[in-house]
Amino acid sequence: MELKVSEKEVEYKPVVLDDGTVKLKKKSKINTGKHSKAKGGIFELRVRKDLEEKGWIVDKWSNNLDLENGNIHPAKRRFARFNASMGVMTIGTGFPDFIAFQKRGDNYKIIGVEVKINGKLSREEKEKCKAYLEKETFSEILVAHKVKEKNRVRVEYVDVLELVDRMR
């Protein structure tokens, strides 16, 4: 009589990074990252739809700001490999996520919108927002975050100046 022992699932998965090195990653962390990325993408679509309903013309912002010399340049394209032979080239990795236009009389109001589910910006992102506002690239920058009310999700916008003022 043979006793069957259930084999323990491998906890780590070897992943080849962009520079060619191999790194062991926890499978639970990989799954968490997949879910977070998917939820972030869904929330970005919700924010875009909400802005369009409010009369804004919305487009993906594909530029980034170099803090060292203050130049705006096209964002780097990322190659997201999901198995050994296949992958996807990601284009829209700029900061902020969206640029929105709205006609106000004879002029247009131009704002930047950064989408964060928790509504928190990193120090570098706050510095980039401050530089964009000083250069007058955008008239204002909003941070869109998720608010749950009675089992409903609502998008709330916070002016980035409120977040930058709290920066140490």
Image (tube, helix red, strand yellow):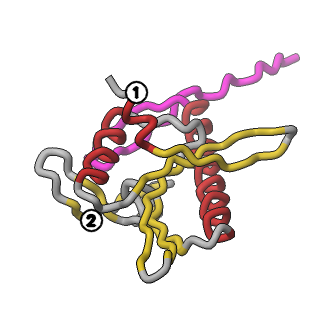
> As rendered, which of 156 and 85 lies closer to the eye?
156
**What's the residue at 25%, 51% (across, down)?**
134
The picture places residue 60, in percent across and down from the top left corner, at 46, 67
* Cα distance in 3D space between marks 2 and 1: 29 Å
Give the mark nearest the N terminus, 2 or 1. 2
Q: Amino acid at mark 1?
A: Arg
Region rendered in magenta: 1-26
Q: Amino acid at mark 2?
A: Pro
| Residue 166, disc | 1
Relative side of 167 to 25, left or right = left
How many C-alpha atoms fall within 10 Å of the one at disc 1: few (<14), some, or many (≥20)?
Answer: few
Where 28 sits versus 135, above or below? above
Residue at the far left: name it.
69
**Vertical placement of residue 131 versus 28, above or below:** below
Local secondary structure at mark 1:
loop
The quarter in which the C terminus is drawn is top left
Disc on res. 74: 2
